[in-house]
């Protein structure tokens, strides 16, 4: 079994991450529009089978196809290149933040929505409670 650090260096991991994000974006788009797969296929000019492939993660898209699908949803795909060791450190910080929130013994602790933000300029990792929009600096990443 691979460690998280090793997993972050596997192409298959990143392909699955991109497929999962495309799935999330497509399902959000369908929910916002109140579409089923047939309606989405009609709007996009593709087959229902193609929509099904997107929603099952059964496609290995070209970059062109990924861009086309993103733009059909009115969104631009943005690509970032981040060192895998840095991502691993963020995972550790993120896990620590979540463990801390779970330890609060607060009835609302399980409903906290946390987001890790990377500020390229300050290189601070921030914990954001989206419900209150409070920002706490958790750790500086060197």
Image: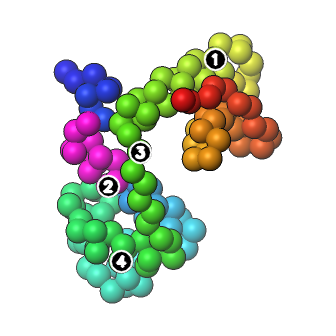
> Helix, strand or loop at disc 4?
helix
Residue under the image location 71 percent in, 30 percent down: 137
- At mark 1, the secondary structure is helix
> Spatial distance from mark 2 to mark 4, Cα to Cα?
14 Å
Magenta span: 9-19
Residue depicted at x 26% and y 51%: 15
Residue hosting label 3: 82
- SS class of the residue under badge 3? loop
* Sequence-wise first label, 3 or 1: 3
The answer to whether one can see residue 128 in this image is yes
Mark 2 or 3, nearer chain start: 2
Dot 1 corresponds to which residue? 100
Q: 95 or 138, which lies in front?
A: 138
Give the residue at x 43% y 54%. 80
- Give whichever of discs 4 and 3 has the lower sequence position: 4
In this view, 142 is above or below 27:
above
Residue named by callout 2: 19
Q: Earlier in the sequence, mark 2 or mark 1?
A: 2
**Residue 38 visible in this rendered orientation of the protein:** no
């Amino acid at each position: 079994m691979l460690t998280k650090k090793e997993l972050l260096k596997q192409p298959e991991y990143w392909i699955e991450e991109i497929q999962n994000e495309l799935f999330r974006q497509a399902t959000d788009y369908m929910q916002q529009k109140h579409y089923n797969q047939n309606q989405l296929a009609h709007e996009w000019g593709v087959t229902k089978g193609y929509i099904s492939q997107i929603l099952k993660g059964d496609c290995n898209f070209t970059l062109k196809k990924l861009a086309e699908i993103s733009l059909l949803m009115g969104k631009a795909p943005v690509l970032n290149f981040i060192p895998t060791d840095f991502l691993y450190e963020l995972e550790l910080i993120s896990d620590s933040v979540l463990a801390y929130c779970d330890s609060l013994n607060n009835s609302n602790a399980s409903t906290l929505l946390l987001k890790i933000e990377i500020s390229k300029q300050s290189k601070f990792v921030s914990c954001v409670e989206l419900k209150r929009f409070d920002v706490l600096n958790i750790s500086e990443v060197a």
